[in-house]
Image (tube, rainbow, N blue to C red):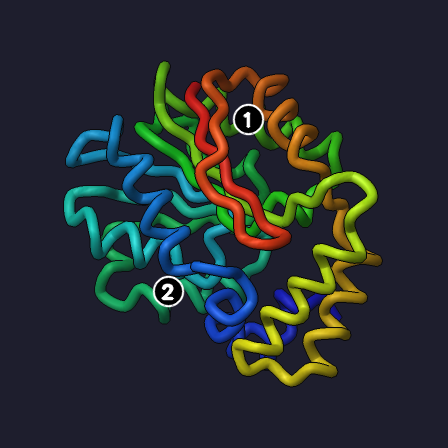
Amino acid sequence: MDAFSDPQAVARYAEGPPRQVPGFADLQRMVMLLLAERAPDDARVLVLGAGGGLEIKAFAEARPGWRFDGVDPSAEMLDLAKLTLGPLVARADLHHGLIDIAPEGPFDAAACILTLHFVERGERLRTLREVRRRLKPGAPFAVGHFSIPQGEGDLWLSRYAAFAASSGIEPAQAQKARSMIAERLPILAPEEDEQLLRDAGFSDVSLFYAGFAFRGWVAYA
């Protein structure tokens, strides 16, 4: 069963990223700050992969004037987002589906955290183009996901598993997650990720985050 439709896995989702992603809370905060460099106080922000609601919650608490459109293909994860957001859900419209279901905007900013590594390369480029098309000229877009140098997957995924185990995840569970990631996720090399952003029409692509197997970039429409 897909982890994002398994009720038990969904219920435990919020426990995972802080223990699996180095500096997860700071990654969210950095993304918020990068978007805020150009987004106005009353910005409309597109969040792709919004299921769970963790990033919208972090952004909404830091920027009380922002409104959000969140998109996710898992209805169960969007239900979790509503619970996570609580009263903040009044500032968010949540949409069930892929990028095509998102409103046309134009948006002042966009973010996509821990999502693009689930998307095959060709569909990833299409997705990025659809995000770009919905942004105002010059609007910031921040992404963060698995991105591993070519030929170094075993090493970096071993480090990912070691970090998870050191954060309190059972070592056997961490190794199982590592194996599933290696088998199932279409992870790209950092230079490929950067090139896809450029091919999608974004400019001034800059690396702002690196945490073991994860990388984050900011770029502009």
Q: Which residue is mark 2?
A: 82
Q: Residues within 10 Å of mark 1 (few under 14, many from 20)?
A: some
Image position, residue 194 (x, y; %):
60, 27
Examine the image and state in which quarter residue 54 appears: bottom left
The label number, if any, that marks residue 204 in the structure image: none
Examine the image and state in which quarter residue 215 appears: top right
- 88 horizontally vs 161: left or right: left
Which residue is rendered at x = 70% and y = 80% of the image? 173
Image position, residue 141 (x, y; %):
43, 31
Image position, residue 153 (x, y; %):
78, 51
- 86 horizontally vs 78: left or right: left
Q: Amino acid at mark 2?
A: Lys
Q: Is residue 30 above or below residue 206?
A: below
Q: Quadrant of the N terminus?
A: bottom right
Looking at the image, do the residues carrying marks 2 and 1 touch, with CB atoms under 8 Å apart? no
Q: Quadrant of the C terminus?
A: top left
Q: Residues within 10 Å of mark 2 (few under 14, many from 20)?
A: many
* Helix, strand or loop at mark 2: helix
Q: Is residue 195 above or below residue 75?
A: above
State the residue in front, 199 or 152: 152
Q: Earlier in the sequence, mark 2 or mark 1?
A: 2
Image position, residue 111 (x, y; %):
43, 40
* Helix, strand or loop at mark 1: helix
State the residue in front, 147 or 80: 147
Q: Amino acid at mark 1?
A: Glu
State the residue in front, 42 or 178: 178
Which residue is rendered at x = 50% and y = 19% of the image? 202
> How far apart are labels 2 and 1 at the CA level?
25 Å
Q: Which residue is mark 1?
A: 130
Which residue is rendered at x = 72% and y = 59% of the image? 157
- 16 horizontally vs 142: left or right: right
